[in-house]
Each structure stands twice: as structure tokens, then as C-alpha cells.
Amino acid sequence: MASKKFLYINRRPPHGSIYAHESLEVVLIGAAFEQDVTLAFIDDGVYQLMQNQDTGGVGLKNFAPTFRALGDYDVNQIYVEQESLELRGLSKDDLIPLTYEDEDDDWAEKDSIHVVSSAELADIIEQQDVILNF
Amino acid sequence: MAIELEGKSYETDEEGYLVNLSDWNDQLANEMAKADGAVLDENHWEVINFLRDYYEEYQIAPAVRVLTKAVGKKLGKDKGTSKYLYELFPYGPAKQACKYAGLPKPTGCV
């Protein structure tokens, strides 16, 4: 049986609500059971992937380093919406570099993050079986 | 629940996982193993230390599939098998080794 394609859409900033952290937990659980997982970051969700986060001031766990484990979980389709980055004065360089090792290409290290336009993202959403919004 | 060791009390949850990560020390790990009827040798410690490093870097305890793959990469292919890890930690490598390492139960473990 072909596995269903799951897309997790992350729209909220990393802290201030439990959504971002919970989304990541669900993604890891799904991936541990070998779901086909794709992640999308749009609107304030792009802040979740910012480099050099420091949660000391808000007294919450900084879970940003956990995104770097996604490659180990074979989660390597991570799409960030270009327009959301631009509106916030950000570019891909501001994001945590996320990579995976491609089993089919002699374990070459490859980029997991793809910056895509809103129109391209719409096509990606179109290809999914299950969509979860966080 | 709690573990008593040398006059100090360490808080654990109902499954025996340490509540405060910073409480951990190797004596405590030995004590937890003893309660399960196990004795930790250098092969156990290799995995326990690996898990602590993994947590330090990624802030999660890895699922067993991920642990197996990562151990194989770091400690050698012969050790990156579920057979090897289950022999060391018969209650489930991720679950049992994480407990001794003072980490929370792995995400995805039910």
C-alpha cells in the first residue's frame, strides 16, 4: 500500500502558543512511523526556522535545534514561502541550514529547505493526501 | 516517584524517567540499571553517552530507527543494528537507554 502524503503547514511564530512545538512533535512521531512527510512554513511560521534563537528571556525551551534532526528522520522536503520571507525582510541565509544524506546518491549531503513562491507552494499542497495546519 | 541515592532524592516520573535532566550522573544511571536487574558495561555506556550527546545537540531523544542508524554511523556498522542494541537494552534500546541517560522518553514512543 502506498503511504499517504502528509503535509504539515506551519503558520505561527515559534513561541507565544504551543502550536509550533506541537507540530514538530507530531512530525517526528509521524516520521518515526515512516509517513511520507512534507513541511511548509508560511506567514510568521518562517520565524520558527530562524538561526541563533535564544529563548532565555522568555523562559521556554529552545526547540529550534530539533529541526536539524529532521534529516535523520528522513524528513527532507521542507518548503518555505518566498513571499513570507520577503515581507519580513528575511532570506534563506537567515534560516538554520537543514540537510539530509541522500541514500540513493552515495549519502551525499543535500539541502532540505526549498524556498518556493506562493504559486509553487499551491502546487505542492495540491499533491498531498492529508494536510494539517498548525 | 524518586530514586534515593547517598542521602539525596531524585525525582522521577511514574515510569522511572528523571524529571530534571540536570540531576543526572553516572551513579544514578547505575542505580537505575540495578533496579532493572542490569549491570552497565562499556558497551552500554557508549550508547548512553551517545544519547546524551544527541540530546545536547538536537534537544530530543531519537526514535529507535533513528538511533540505530546514527549509532551505526558514529560507533561502527556492526553496532548500528537493532539486534546489537536490543541485546544491550532488552526493554527497548531507545526507551531503556534514554532512561539511564536521564533523558525523557523518546518522542514517538507510546
Image (cartoon, coloured by chain):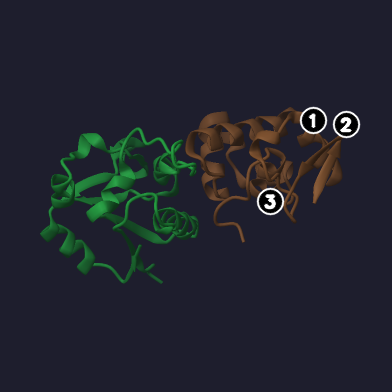
Chain colours: A green, B brown
Crowdedness near tag 3: few (<14), some (14–19) or many (≥20) residues, C-alpha within 10 Å: some
* Mark closer to the observer (3, 2): 2
Between residue B57 and residue B67, name the one nearer to us.
B57
* Mark closer to the observer (3, 1): 1
Q: Chain of mark 3?
A: B
Viewer can see residue A95: yes
Tell me the quarter of the picture where residue B47 sits. top right
Which residue position holds label 3?
A: B92
**Left or right of A99 on screen, residue A60:** right
* Three-letter code, disc 3: Gly
**Left or right of B106 on screen, residue B17:** right
Q: Chain of mark 1?
A: B
Contact flag, marks 3 and 2 (Cβ < 8 Å): no
Horizontal and vertical percent position of residue A122: 16, 64
Which residue position holds label 2?
A: B6
**Mark with earlier residue (3, 1):** 1
Q: Secondary structure at mark 2?
A: loop
Contact flag, marks 2 and 1 (Cβ < 8 Å): yes
Q: Residue at x 48, y 44 (%)?
A: A60
Same-chain status of marks 3 and 2: yes
Between residue A100 and residue B80, name the one nearer to us.
A100
Circle number at residue A83: none
**Left or right of A76 on screen, residue B78:** right
* Three-letter code, disc 2: Glu
Q: Residue at x 31, y 56 (%)?
A: A12
Work out whether A1 lies above or below B68.
below
* Mark closer to the observer (2, 1): 2
Same-chain status of marks 2 and 1: yes
Tell me the quarter of the picture where residue A2 sits. bottom left
Placement of the C terminus of chain A among the 4 image quadrants: bottom left
Q: CA distance from mark 2 to mark 1?
A: 10 Å
